[in-house]
Image (spheres, rainbow, N blue to C red):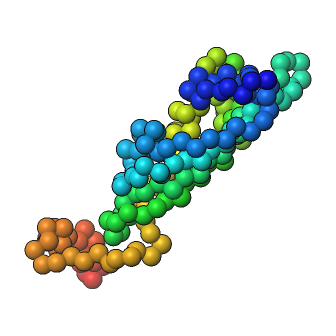
């Protein structure tokens, strides 16, 4: 069987019948939404990914198409503590089961451990990969130990705003004393 797969117009049945892992490297700059989240990308920042399709028999019906996606990347993000770049490891390890319609997917979704997707004649694997990587990004990227300590200087608008803002719990402290 030919291994001439196209990630943006993938024939899932063909991939499942092939049954062999398909590995690729994709530059983060080629994933526009992920690249928009990143800071200070280099031309070599990339995602290593592998996908495997398989057919699983089911009683009284056609074999079901399943897909397993593994991906790893190091995405440069801004540390929210020190505001410098932090290389953030991102990993995806997810199974997908393909069903015939959105109604079936909605009905079976609560009981399924795997993600359910609707079978399409031309599946966009790159969109799925990018979606999963975006969901795997941390909400607040930070170094474990920041290389620099944030310092506020006198006259810094952020420091002045913090000092000028009254403490909302100060009123509660007054009530407790009474």
Rendered-image quadrant of the C terminus: bottom left
Residue 67 percent across, percent down from the top left: 71, 34
* Figure check: 162 above or below 31: below
Residue 105 percent across, percent down from the top left: 66, 26
Query: Which residue is farthest right?
Result: 59
In front here: 48 or 16?
Answer: 48
Residue 48 percent across, percent down from the top left: 60, 47
- Residue at 39% across, 76% down: 147
Rendered-image quadrant of the N terminus: top right
Instruction: State left or right for residue 40 relative to residue 105.
Output: left
Q: Is residue 102 visible?
A: no
Q: Is residue 58 visible?
A: yes
Query: Which residue is farthest bottom?
Result: 177
Query: Which residue is farthest left?
Result: 155
Instruction: State left or right for residue 162 relative to residue 52.
Output: left
- Residue at 43% across, 42% down: 29
Number of numbered markers: 0
In front here: 14 or 27?
Answer: 27
- Residue at 27% across, 83% down: 177
Q: Quadrant of residue 112?
A: top right
- Residue at 67% across, 26% down: 4
Q: Quadrant of residue 166?
A: bottom left
Instruction: State left or right for residue 113 relative to residue 81.
Output: right
Instruction: State left or right for residue 138 relative to residue 79.
Output: right
* Figure check: 113 above or below 14: below
* Figure check: 128 above or below 42: above
């Amino acid at each position: 069987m030919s291994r001439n797969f196209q990630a943006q117009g993938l024939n899932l049945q063909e991939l499942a019948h092939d049954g062999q892992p398909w590995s690729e490297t994709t530059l983060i700059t080629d994933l526009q939404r992920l690249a928009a989240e990143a800071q200070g990308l280099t031309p070599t920042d990339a995602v290593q990914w592998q996908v495997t399709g398989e057919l699983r028999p089911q009683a009284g019906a056609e074999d079901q198409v399943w897909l397993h996606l593994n991906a790893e990347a190091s995405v440069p993000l801004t540390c929210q503590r020190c505001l410098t770049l932090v290389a953030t490891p991102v990993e995806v390890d997810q199974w997908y089961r393909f069903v015939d319609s959105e109604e079936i997917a909605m009905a079976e979704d609560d009981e399924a451990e795997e993600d359910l997707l609707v079978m399409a004649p031309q599946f966009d694997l790159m969109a799925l990969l990018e979606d999963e990587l975006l969901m795997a990004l941390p909400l607040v990227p930070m170094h474990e130990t920041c290389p620099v300590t944030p310092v506020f200087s006198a006259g810094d608008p952020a420091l002045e705003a913090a000092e000028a803002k009254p403490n909302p719990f100060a009123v509660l402290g007054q009530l407790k004393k009474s």
